[in-house]
Amino acid sequence: MCKLRDFPKRINLSEQSLDGEKKQLRYRLSGTIGYQNNNHYVAYCHSLSSSWQFFNDSLPQPRGINSSTDIIPHGVLYILCQNSTNL
């Protein structure tokens, strides 16, 4: 179990092409998939403004959620940023 705020907001990785060129890849946190109440998966989406939204198909609409919320993560999604304005 962990809290939503425990996930790094950004990840920087380097990649080397076959010709030896190194490239810095930057990713930003987009969301996570969580497990809740007996075999039910839910989604937590992280916006560019750093707020979290909770999505659950048992609820009529998404709702805001606090970053101190405890979750059981089953996957985390990061999106590749093309330039620094997307960070």
Image (cartoon, rainbow, N blue to C red):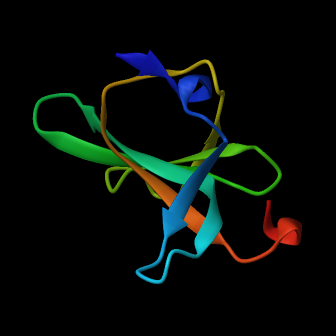
Q: Residue at x 66, y 27 (%)?
A: 66
Give the residue furthest to the left. 39
Left or right position of 68 against 72: right
Q: Quadrant of the N terminus?
A: top left
Left or right position of 62 against 50: left
Q: Residue at x 62, y 26 (%)?
A: 5
Q: Residue at x 33, y 57 (%)?
A: 57
Asked if residue 13 is positioned above or below residue 3 in the image, the reply reads below
Q: Quadrant of residue 9?
A: top right
Q: Position of residue 38 (x, y in %)?
A: 11, 30
Q: Position of residue 75 (x, y in %)?
A: 32, 46
Q: Quadrant of the C terminus?
A: bottom right
Nearer to me, 87 or 18:
18
Left or right position of 70 against 30: left
Nearer to me, 71 or 80:
80
Give the residue furthest to the bottom. 19
Q: Quadrant of residue 6?
A: top right
Give the residue furthest to the right. 85
Q: Position of residue 31 (x, y in %)?
A: 51, 51
Q: Position of residue 64 (x, y in %)?
A: 66, 42
Asked if residue 31 is positioned above or below residue 69 in the image, the reply reads below
Nearer to me, 72 or 29:
29
Q: Residue at x 83, y 51 (%)?
A: 49
Q: Quadrant of residue 7?
A: top right
